[in-house]
């Protein structure tokens, strides 16, 4: 700044100033010196003291000249003026002294003022700098307050506001603060503040991840409860409407027809899951252009959490809680996928899902490796099917889980088959083979509701009076009951499984056939050999007949049941097994009858060389026929089976009589004995005709024909091929030869010529028959 230019005084200016000074005011008795102050100050300020004094001296000299002139002109006046002048001079001297003193004083004061002025200016500069510093400090304080506020916002979890505050700092207008090192240092610290915000929001998200891991089980539990309610509601509606039986929960029909109240398990009265920390973290990372880092970190964290869900080995007791946690885990993932835009990709979620499902399948299979209780498999299936249905509603792929369930089903079916096979073996073994008795209507109705019967028989039994003796034993009822339980448990496992009905039907076919054939039919067949009571064997026959009917009725009912679920027809091959066992049972009936017939034949006392012929049958045959008709007619079996029993018994009688005449136990006999056997045969044929079984007499044809050949001496006719083929075709030559040999031995043992001659003739006839048919067996 340029120095201020001092003002210059001319002579005229100084004269004018001096003229204004009145040292003596005529009207005042005191000196008027106040006016000197400003003038002297101004002179001192302008540093013109010397000039002023010169001008003052010149003024004095001028005034002296004027005074002298005046004195000259007016001496007296001069004298007085001189006196006055002396006075003035003295005053002037005094004034000069005073001026000098004043000048010194003014100089001293001026120098003080200058110093004070300098000090004042310096103070003003200092004050200005202080003001500027204060303004800067206030600006710094504002910035520092913002920075401090950022820390508080971070602590309060207001990360977005903290980030906006950082942006506000960056957008501050240029001023004196922006040029300070403090501001530059502050700008350099902004990245660390961003990192601090990022770390804080990341920590918040990590804490949120921990919290949702803790509530995932509850989320899954609520979702499974909602699905269970939905399933039960749909099952109830499906049972009322046959048109809906083909549709399962989650199908298009169910979603369209059933009123749905979508329950958000993440925001309900029981649970509210706050996703704000995640959304805030995504927003912050997006703003910081670091969303890819967050995406990778989130995926890694969720994968680590998913890896920790399943323990190794998997305890089946905790499977329910584990599936709840898995279900909640992926419901949360589904919500995150839907609400976070591009933050999560479907592929990332699928990777977590597929990995966890694979581990779950392996863990379940491993846990069930040594399991032998079918109910354990059923509980696992019940747990998995609700889990699958729930996650299907969130659009997760569940094909591998359905395959797991079908794999478990195959093992379950095998164990179930083994369990029921042991039960069926026990039922058959413990059966008393006595007719089942019912005494009250409710008991009758409950039994008829369990067993499978021909509709006409069921209708007849339901109308029968009480007490009622049913045509089957307790074993048949228990087997039917367990078959129903087996089918119920079988289909209970596949309830809710929507795939591979054909495989299930085939497996059911095989299982039922094995149970019915191997563990009911075969077990009954084994029991036959140890059952010696005819009534029990007959009851077994009746049971087997009803099992055959049950197979047919079971095929129809199962086929009807499967047709409602798009399954195939059920075809049971075990009916043939029961038919074969019926045949064995009937043979057992015949065997027991024949064993009793042996007792009668043991009582037979035939004379094989009688001297005369009898006109009446043997007495034991009366008892035999009475016993046979009484026993067989009392059998509670079909008429055709009774006829088979009669046929077997009559055939055995015929065989026994044949053995009498051709067997090795009787070495010799005569024609009279043969005639007596023929009389017994005719008696038996008559009795058979009497009881309406005359068609069974054909079993005696060979015996009768052989007796006719012997008694009529028609052996030569028998040797004629044409006659043999037309008249004696039923006779086996070896038997005839054996009989002729016995007759020959009898004749040769006699002493009379006629008998010996007849015996020789029989020997020749025997040889002739043997030559015609050499080597033929009996």
Image (cartoon, rainbow, N blue to C red):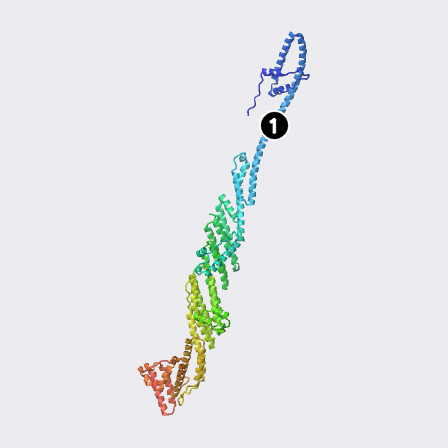
Q: Is residue 169 left or right of residue 643?
A: right
The quarter of the image holding the N terminus is top right
Where is residue 673 shown, x and y percent of the image? 40, 87
Q: Nearer the viewer, residue 524 or 90?
A: 524
Where is residue 449 shown, x and y percent of the image? 47, 68
Mark 1 closeness class: few <14, some 14–19, many ≥20 residues within 10 Å: some
Q: Residue at x 46, y 77 (%)?
A: 534
Residue 60 visible somewhere in the drawing? yes
Q: Residue at x 37, y 89 (%)?
A: 747
Where is residue 62 shown, x and y percent of the image? 62, 12
Say what secondary structure mark 1 lies in.
helix
Where is residue 588 shown, x and y percent of the image? 44, 76
- Residue at the right extreme of this rendering: 29
User: Which residue position is annotated with label 1?
Assistant: 120
Marks counted in the figure total 1
**Where is 249 relative to 650, above or below?**
above
Q: Nearer the viewer, residue 487 or 723?
A: 487
**Where is 736 relative to 24, above or below?**
below
Q: Nearer the viewer, residue 761 or 594?
A: 594
The quarter of the image holding the C terminus is bottom left
In the figure, residue 538 lies in which quadrant?
Answer: bottom left
**Where is 593 relative to 242, above or below?**
below
Residue 411 visible somewhere in the drawing? no
């Amino acid at each position: 700044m340029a120095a201020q230019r001092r003002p210059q005084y001319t002579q005229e200016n100084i004269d004018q100033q001096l003229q204004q000074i009145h040292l003596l005011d005529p009207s005042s008795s005191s000196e008027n010196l106040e006016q000197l102050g400003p003038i002297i100050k101004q002179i001192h300020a302008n540093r013109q003291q010397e000039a002023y004094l010169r001008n003052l001296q010149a003024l004095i000299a001028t005034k002296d000249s004027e005074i002298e002139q005046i004195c000259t002109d007016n001496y007296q006046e001069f004298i007085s003026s001189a006196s006055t002048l002396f006075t003035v001079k003295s005053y002037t001297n005094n004034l000069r002294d005073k001026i000098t003193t004043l000048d010194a004083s003014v100089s001293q004061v001026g120098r003080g003022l200058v110093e004070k002025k300098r000090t004042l200016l310096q103070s003003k500069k200092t004050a200005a700098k202080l003001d500027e510093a204060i303004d800067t400090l206030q600006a710094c304080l504002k910035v520092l307050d913002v920075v401090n506020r950022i820390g508080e916002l971070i602590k309060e979890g207001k990360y977005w506001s903290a980030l906006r505050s950082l942006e506000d700092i960056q957008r501050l207008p240029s001023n004196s603060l922006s040029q300070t090192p403090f501001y530059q240092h502050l700008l350099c610290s902004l990245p660390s503040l961003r990192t601090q915000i990022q770390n804080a929001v990341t920590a918040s998200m990590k804490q949120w991840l921990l919290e949702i891991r803790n509530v995932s089980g509850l989320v899954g539990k609520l979702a499974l409860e909602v699905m269970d309610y939905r399933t039960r509601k749909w099952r109830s509606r499906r049972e009322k409407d046959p048109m809906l039986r083909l549709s399962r929960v989650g199908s298009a029909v169910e979603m369209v027809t059933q009123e749905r109240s979508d329950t958000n398990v993440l925001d309900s009265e029981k649970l509210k899951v706050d996703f704000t920390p995640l959304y805030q973290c995504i927003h912050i990372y997006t703003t910081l252009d670091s969303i890819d880092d967050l995406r990778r970190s989130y995926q890694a964290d969720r994968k680590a959490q998913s890896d920790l869900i399943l323990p190794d080995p998997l305890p089946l007791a905790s499977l329910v809680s584990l599936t709840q946690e898995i279900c909640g885990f992926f419901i949360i993932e589904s919500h995150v996928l839907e609400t976070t835009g591009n933050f999560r990709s479907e592929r990332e979620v699928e990777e977590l899902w597929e990995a966890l499902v694979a581990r779950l399948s392996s863990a379940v299979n491993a846990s069930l490796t040594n399991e032998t209780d079918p109910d354990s498999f059923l509980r696992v299936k019940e747990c998995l099917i609700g889990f699958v249905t729930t996650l299907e509603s969130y659009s997760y792929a569940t094909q591998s889980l359905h395959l797991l369930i079908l794999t478990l089903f195959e093992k379950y079916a095998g164990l179930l088959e083994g369990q029921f096979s042991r039960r069926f073996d026990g039922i058959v073994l413990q059966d008393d083979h006595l007719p089942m008795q019912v005494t009250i209507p409710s008991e009758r109705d409950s039994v008829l509701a369990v067993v499978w019967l021909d509709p006409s028989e069921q209708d007849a039994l339901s109308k029968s009076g009480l007490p009622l003796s049913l045509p089957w034993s307790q074993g048949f009822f228990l087997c039917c009951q367990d078959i129903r339980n087996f089918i119920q448990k079988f289909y209970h496992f596949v309830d809710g499984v929507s795939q591979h009905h054909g495989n299930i039907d085939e497996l059911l076919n095989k299982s039922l056939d094995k149970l019915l054939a191997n563990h009911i039919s075969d077990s009954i067949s084994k029991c036959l050999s140890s059952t010696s009571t005819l009534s029990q064997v007959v009851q077994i026959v009746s049971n087997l007949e009803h099992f055959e009917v049950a197979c047919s009725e079971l095929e129809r009912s199962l086929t009807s049941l499967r047709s409602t679920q798009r399954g195939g027809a059920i075809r049971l091959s075990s009916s043939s097994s029961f038919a074969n066992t019926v045949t064995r049972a009937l043979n057992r009936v015949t065997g027991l009858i024949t064993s009793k017939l042996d007792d009668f034949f043991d009582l037979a006392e035939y004379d094989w060389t009688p001297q005369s012929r009898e006109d009446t049958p043997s007495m034991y045959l009366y008892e035999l026929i009475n016993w046979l008709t009484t026993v067989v007619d009392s059998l509670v079996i079909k008429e055709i089976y009774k006829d088979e029993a009669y046929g077997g018994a009559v055939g055995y009688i015929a065989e026994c009589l044949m053995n009498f005449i051709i067997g090795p136990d009787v070495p010799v006999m005569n024609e009279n004995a043969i005639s007596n056997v023929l009389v017994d045969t005719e008696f038996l044929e008559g009795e058979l005709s009497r009881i309406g079984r005359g068609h069974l007499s054909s079993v005696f044809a060979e015996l009768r024909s052989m007796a006719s050949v012997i008694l009529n001496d028609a052996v030569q006719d028998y040797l004629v091929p044409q006659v043999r083929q037309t008249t004696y075709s039923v006779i086996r030559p070896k038997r005839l030869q054996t009989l002729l040999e016995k007759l020959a031995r009898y004749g040769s043992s006699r002493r009379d010529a006629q008998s010996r001659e007849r015996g020789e003739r029989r020997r020749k006839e025997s040889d002739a028959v043997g030559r015609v048919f050499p080597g033929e067996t009996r």
